[in-house]
Image: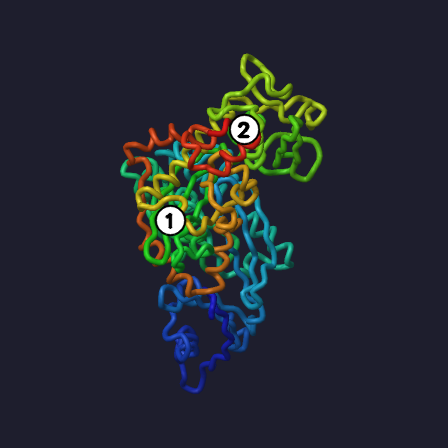
Amino acid sequence: MYGLTRKVFRQIRPPGNGDIKGDRERIIDALADEFGRPVFSNELLQKIYPLCRDANWEITLTLINEFGKWRIIELGPGNQCQRQLAFALDLGSTSLAMRLLDLNSGEILGEDSLLNKQIQFGDDILTRIFHVKNRADQLKKIQAVTVETINLLMTKLAANNQIKPEDVTMTTIAGNTTMIHFLMGVDPWPIFEHPFAPVFNDTGYLTASEMGLKSRGLVYCLPSVANYLGGDTLSGLLVAGLHQKEELGLFIDIGTNGEMVLGNKDFLVAGAGAAGPALEGGISQTGMKATAGAVDSVLIKNDHLRFTTIAGGKALGICGSGIVDLIAQMLLNGWIDFSGRFNANASDRIVKREGELGVCYARGSETGSGKDLLFTETDLKQFIDTKAAAGTMVSYLLERVGVEAADLDRIYVSGAFGTYINLESAITIGLYPDLPRERFVFLGNSSLEGATRLIYDQRLMDELIDLQKRIEYLEFGAAIDFLSRMYAARFLPHTNLNDYPSVKANLIKRGILAAR
């Protein structure tokens, strides 16, 4: 099994005694027995002299199999085969996560992440799309900060391993369709405007130098399927393996966007749409990303609210997993009703500020600022709207295929949000179907993991291309009853409690719901 790139050492026969064949042709001849007649770029042509002569014609060549044709992407003096390095990147709208890989040992040498500097142009993708629409200067700026963030990660990981970014000759990038458009400096407005077709789905192989990256060699951006179904989802599918299994599975990645794929080895149907910042804490005045000081879990027992924060210490705000817990716990304890209205008499934690009810989930003595932290009815309504959108996307996808939630053998949950939220809480509020818990598989950052696996195994390239062709994409916005379905899902967990039997039983047990 070979990865996307290979390094080989060759002792090239030097010219002389009437043998005046060109250096380029000598190198290609030395590879012909194993690699046919590889493509040799003009950029590398400029490196041959004096490199080959200075190295006494002993050189290392790095090659990539570019869709069936070998291409030389780097050459250097002496035998450098002992180390072959690559970067794998998850280009997210909120943050970037990158790995430095040793392709010889299979070891992950380092992993790090940074907030996406695009955030200065808007917290959500749609704001950024509107910001650059028909504004070439702003598009250039957003591309520049994207490249800058990637280069910062490359430099940091390289320094931590006593190498230079230029020592890395292969990079894979998995990101949603808009993020790759921004990276390429292409206006993504067509993604948002009818008929919602992106400018491109596949970049093919690119050189790191033309993209302004500090690494060398080639860059491969995993292809997209549609406007809201990008290479990050295809990367995740390589990890979930839905397309290879008999059992019926559902892949879900809910974050700023909600992406989902339903199917097995016989069919794949997908849909996606904007979910908004609610699931990342972005809908509350006291909401925050999942960083130090964020309330990440909540428990209400005997009307006493307790919470934990990331990294311990006093609360600074609340992130997505904390919000899901808070809402679920308030529902199970009668602090809110099924529509999300507060019960003002349920607890002294429920207060009225500026004419609006809210829950004081962290009192001043428990916070870093010394001020109460509230989650208001407005916050709750916005979160329920987001939850309703995600839940409706799932139910619509299932109905279009003619199956029910109970028919799902596996649910693959991807992304940071899905990894860290409490599964029981997510089901309690109707974010996920009420199924046996052992059917849920948590993949973590499957976008980064898929980009990693692709580098190690070139056979996955065929799977990736096949996935892109096989997936049938549904446009949720074209569903005439989508909004009415969303309205039905704007309850906790849903208007039809019979779809959530374990939640219903728990509510009856707690005396919140009368037994029928």
Residue positioned 43% across, 78% down in the render: 30
Picture coordinates of residue 406, whole percent (x, y): 41, 46
How many marks are shown on the rendered structure? Answer: 2
Mark 2 or mark 1, earlier in chain: 1
**In this view, the mark in front (2 or 1):** 2
Residue projecting furthest to the front: 516
Tell me the SS state at disc 1. strand
What residue is shown with label 2? 331
Q: Position of residue 39 (x, y in %)?
A: 38, 68
Give the left or right position of residue 327, taking residue 66 as reference: right
Q: Can the viewer see residue 217 in this picture?
A: no
Residue, disc 1 = 262
Q: CA distance from mark 2 to mark 1?
A: 30 Å
Residue 374 vertical placement versus 48 (above, below): above
In front: 304, or 109? 304
Residue 178: quarter of image: top left
Q: Nearer the viewer, residue 510 or 308?
A: 510
SS assignment at label 2: helix
Residue at x 31% of width, y 46% of height: 401
**Residue 265 in the image: above or below residue 313:** below
Q: Is 410 positioned to the left or the right of 194 in the image?
A: right
What amino acid type should be assigned to the residue bearing mark 2?
Answer: Leu
Residue 423: image location, x then y, percent: 54, 42
